[in-house]
Amino acid sequence: MRAQVRPGSVTGSVTAVLVVFAAAGFVMGQALSRVPAVRDHVGADTAQLGLALMGMGLGSLLAMPFTGRLVDRYGSRRVVLVAVLLGCLGWSLVPLVPSVPTLLLLLVLTGMNIGIWDVAMNIQGTHVEQARRRSLMPYFHAAFSGGAVLGAGSGALAAWLGVGLVQLPVLALVAAVAGALGATRFVPEDDAAGTVAAGIDAAGIDAAGTDAADAPPARGAVTRVEVLIGLICLAGALAEGSANDWLALLLVDVHGAPEAFGALTLTAFNLTMMIGRLLGGPAIERFGRVAVVRAGGVLAGVAILVVTLSPSLLLALAGGLLWGLGVATIFPAAISAAGEVPGRGNRAITVVSTIAYGAFLFGAPTIGLVAEQVGLDRALFLVVGFLVLLVVLGPALAPRSRSRV
């Protein structure tokens, strides 16, 4: 049974999705830009901080497998609204934690809501993209990056002014208000069946031009292509997440840069990632998803080597810019590819997102533990290895007939 979409709202609100993505990036960017300050606040070393940051990935992985079912039952509007409020509350409580174990627990709970927020807004985004028959996902993720730029920039300014972690609850409140307002404009799904027939217009024709009744039946089993897309998404998430988790700390601890410069470089990373995503839609339509993602993987790998091997802060800043540009299209392209897996609908996006968030579970602690032995700069070579895997698996992103149930 297909959920009924209200007349006049079948295409959804692009603005609403953009706002929710931007709010997600803003609250994350403003928090992660202050990782050195959080590290000092709880008295953690690099390995302990890596284990604490693991909480975000662990919480997300615990919750994400159930997000597709939550959206099926309650609709993405309700699911995102609750996740926005609880996720922002979690970030706002970081200044109150007294120790590493408490920080780990808080980040697990926060990560659960952030993971649900992430998957549910991507589900809504793929609905809007397919209904409007345009490559919109890079723009939605550009909004996320734009929010992260504003958030990280706010963190850099706060660090420069000597403002403490009181910044976190203040800016989390801003993100909560914006995200909640955006979620109220999401296309509502039927509460019983709960799945939007994305890309299907009032005449029952999907984005590929086939009748809705001829769409493949839903399948319960995870398909091979979902796993491959998930591994590509994992590599991209690891490259993106390692910059958010470690780039500022790398410049402060390894290169001896001021804390404000570390936050500034993270801002530069998110800025070029936003620019890359704004250009990603036209680039994908011209050159194809596979070519764009592969080129991005190569560029990101080279950029990481520049950041880690160069003693120059200016070259490190340039590397941060190229790093963001390289990873820009990987995650949104993978989500779009997942949305095209025949007969899998919301479940395919959930599977791919869950695999990708394994990067946040294993990435931060693994890099942190390796960094204790060989240094943070050399530990980031692991990310380069995963980007090589991404380039090899790139053909799995080839376009398919868009059909969702």
Image (tube, rainbow, N blue to C red):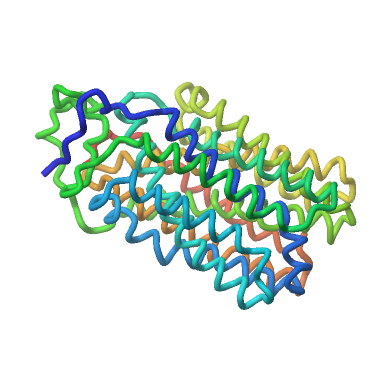
**Residue at x 52%, y 49% (from the top left corner):** 390
Q: Nearer the viewer, residue 329 or 122?
A: 122
Q: How many numbered markers are drawn?
A: 0
Above or below — where is 65 with respect to 46? Answer: above
In the displayed structure image, the side of residue 214 where residue 356 appears, left or right: right
**Residue at x 45%, y 58% (from the top left corner):** 113
Q: Is residue 228 visible?
A: no
x, y percentage for residue 393? 46, 48
**Residue at x 37%, y 55% (from the top left corner):** 227
Above or below — where is 48 with respect to 147? Answer: below
Q: In which quadrant of the rendered view does residue 398 lie?
A: top left
In the displayed structure image, the side of residue 318 where residue 197 appears, left or right: left
x, y percentage for residue 146? 61, 35
Q: Quadrant of the N terminus?
A: top left
x, y percentage for residue 240? 60, 49
Above or below — where is 112 with respect to 300? Answer: below
